[in-house]
Amino acid sequence: MSISIRNISKQFGTFQALDDVSIDIPSGELVALLGPSGCGKTTLLRIIAGLDYADRGQILLDGDDASARHVRERRVGFVFQHYALFRHMSIADNVAFGLRVRPRRERLAEAEIRRRVKKLLELVQLDWLADRYPPQLSGGQRQRIALARALAVEPKVLLLDEPFGALDAKVRKELRRWLRQLHDEIHVTSVFVTHDQEEALEVADRVVVINKGKVEQIGTPESVYDHPATPFVANFLGSVNLFHGRVEDGHLHLGEHALALGAEGGSEGRAVAFVRPHEFDLVPGWHADGGLPARILRVAAVGPSAQIEVSRVDGELIEVTISRDAFQLLGLAEGDQVSLRPRHIRVFQAEALAA
Amino acid sequence: MSTSIALHAGSLERAETASTREPAWVKVVLISVALSFFAVFLLLPLGTVFAEALRKGWGAYLEALVNRDAWDAIRLTLITAAIAVPLNLVFGVAAAWSIAKFEFRGKRLLITFIDLPFSVSPVISGLIYVLLFGAQGWFGPWLQEHDIQIIFAVPGIVLATIFVTFPFVARELIPLMEAQGSEEEEAAVVLGASGWQVFWHITLPNIKWGLLYGVILCNARAMGEFGAVSVVSGHIRGQTNTMPLFVEILYNEYNYVAAFAVASLLALLAIVTLALKTLVERQTRRQLQEIAATSETET
């Protein structure tokens, strides 16, 4: 089922949680709502589910206005951040709940319900836990049970609120891969909320970046990462180095130094520029026309890459990441002079940052 | 050599524990004060009740209980509890539900007012009803015109009892329901459950021990209430005498054995209530620990 979010606005007291948000989600897609905490993403998810109401705007499910439809009738599956498993019911009863509360004439036979529950528990690979109770399960297991319970009613849309938020790092990584595989199997339109950019970029087909109740950018993980539309997106997705300067004749002027901007360029005037740590080339020594002069402060060469902290002449700190092999070839050490040559600079007009 | 070190370490350990512990005599004094207080003020009166009731033997004891007036008092007490407790169960659940699951204006005020019967003297609780429904009260003339008697009759006793026992169920449920939040209910609604199904399958099982605890306390108070009921009762033998009031009448008539015999029934009720309460308390505590454990592993 496709989801159309049309001009949704929501206010809590004087706080504008959502401000004229419009998003189109085609059927079968897995979409991430990404943003810092308090940006309104969970509110939007709850409005799609019908657990909250928008002040203005519409939610269309498969083209039909669902705004007036009760949560019960929306056929959505919702996975809560803290799972909200029914603590007094066994795992099997939890999963069966949605099937058992149906009106008598729509209800499946008990044997059929049991068969379905078994199938769902197999789908989430936890059929051996059927007779346990929620408090006896680990966080990751509860999360998967919550998912199985949501899928039991065959929802047209699956909504997940910070699905991995309460799990430790290792389980998180496993589970999000597993969620991606599961989605590829069952292909139900899914929306999940997260504040973790890595999670959004790894799992989703498309990412919706939200900030302060507004949509900043919608796009595939590659496009939002490589071509951020706003300074917020550039800043929020992955680590970046921020430069304040001026753009004049195709160059970014930072104090007395200038960096060529290449084809993308940027409009003239005061500007902010972003360069990701891995988009720098390091050249030993200072060169008159070759990049920003700096000095190496600290090197952490653990794992496949070397994290290098350098300081510009004016004392500003810059993070650089290059492969460990490349770093060893350069033969640089802490305290050495280097020139930084960005391969890629994203420039925004300075006013855009304030907005 | 090694033994001397061990000895030294041992004495050091003893010195440390001794420094954080009170001297033995403090412990002995505190415990004996607490125990003797308990014996003199709680155990002794309780024992006296049964001793006095049985002073003239089992025959006199049973005789005191098996007579019309005693039966009427017992019956009225049971009827009052049978009306007041279910009503307060419903009110209590409704109040706790609205406070724990909804945000609305005046919520704090409602919480404060639920406690009102606890903070007001029971005599005043009774007087309120006399002022409202008594012959000279606000609704007095109207009630008399329609030949409805509330004060000095069973309805007044029931009303006063409801007022006095109102907080027990609600007070017990509010913290429990607030701790549980409403995510489970929301999950149930999304899965297609109706409001009634949510209450029956999700909310009620989650609060059942707390609810039972509240009902037990509510019932004990409903059967034992004296002050408020005394004001509205009129003390008509066989008609408006509850057990506590009947005890007073018998005592004032110097009928000690009968007074203590009826009192012993109330005391038995108290003991049974305590036993039930301890049992249920254990269950509620376990449930709260489960909630704590669940939220701990989640964060």
Image: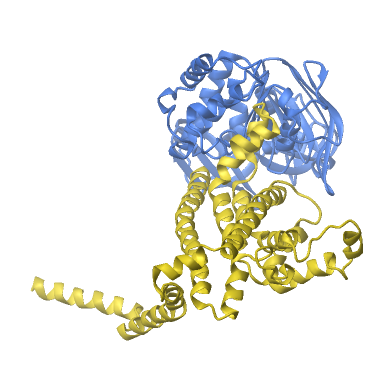
Chain colours: A blue, B yellow
Percent position of residue B36, x then y: 39, 81
Q: Toward the viewer: A342 or A229?
A: A229
Q: Quadrant of residue A238?
A: top right
Q: Is residue A344 visible?
A: no
Residue B230 in the image, given as x and y percentages of width and height? 69, 71
Location of the N terminus of chain B (image quadrant): bottom left
What residue do we see at 72% from left, 48% from top?
A: B98
The image shows residue B254 at horizontal and vertical percentages of 55, 81
Residue at image x 41%, y 68%?
B59
Q: Residue sitting at 56 percent across and 43 percent down?
A: B206
**Image side of residue A263 versus residue A290, left or right:** right
Identify which residue, A334 or B166, lies in the foreground.
B166
Of residues B33 and A156, which is closer to you in this image?
B33
Q: Position of residue A188 (x, y in %)?
A: 64, 17
Q: Is residue B211 above or below residue A146?
A: below
Left or right: B185 as drawn, with respect to A273? left
